[in-house]
Image (cartoon, rainbow, N blue to C red):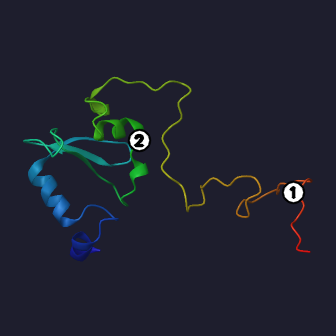
Amino acid sequence: MGIFGDLFTWWDGATLSTKLYTRSSGKLIGEDERGNKFYHQKKGVGPLGTPRRWVIYNGAAEASKVSGDWHGWLHHTVDTPPNQENYQAKGWQKAHVENLTGTSGAYRPAGSTLKTGKKAKPMSDYQPWRAE
């Protein structure tokens, strides 16, 4: 998109002003496996009395691209960034998956008109309403 994309669109990455603010006021803390970069404020504190934390998305700005561990750090739930701790996921934990709504990978329950394959049979106790 070039310079106009950087100036006016936020959904396909950081705007020019966000990039300038990040360069002048942010310190890179880490990067996740999706290429999202996480920053915190170099000096001072934000309006809540703590240094601001933010993410620059790799590609489209979609909050569900941030995994739970980085989400906790971004929202000051934990103080230690995930890349600085020795956490190992439990065997029963699933890998993070971003929101797939609107894609071919979206969840389609049984009976959905969008689901391919065998359709669920209608319920036998259903009686349509009739005007008399």
Q: Is residue 64 left or right of residue 102?
A: left
Q: Position of residue 63 (x, y in %)?
A: 39, 52
- In the depicted structure, whether residue 41 falls above or below residue 88: below
Circle 1 SS class: loop
Q: Position of residue 85 (x, y in %)?
A: 30, 25
**Quarter of the figure with residue 31:** top left
| Residue type, mark 2 in image | Ser
Residue drawn at x 30%, y 36% is 73
Disc with the residue nearer the chain's start (1 vs 2): 2
In the foreground, 26 or 76: 76
**Quarter of the figure with residue 11:** bottom left
Looking at the figure, which quarter contains the N terminus?
bottom left
Residue drawn at x 89%, y 71% is 130
| Residue type, mark 1 in image | Pro
Residue that mark 2 sits on: 67
In the foreground, 110 or 81: 110
Residues packed near mark 1 inside 10 Å, few (<14), some (14 to 19) or many (20 plus): few
Looking at the figure, which quarter contains the C terminus?
bottom right
Q: Is residue 51 left or right of residue 130?
A: left
Residue that mark 1 sits on: 122
Image mark count: 2
**Quarter of the figure with residue 15:** bottom left
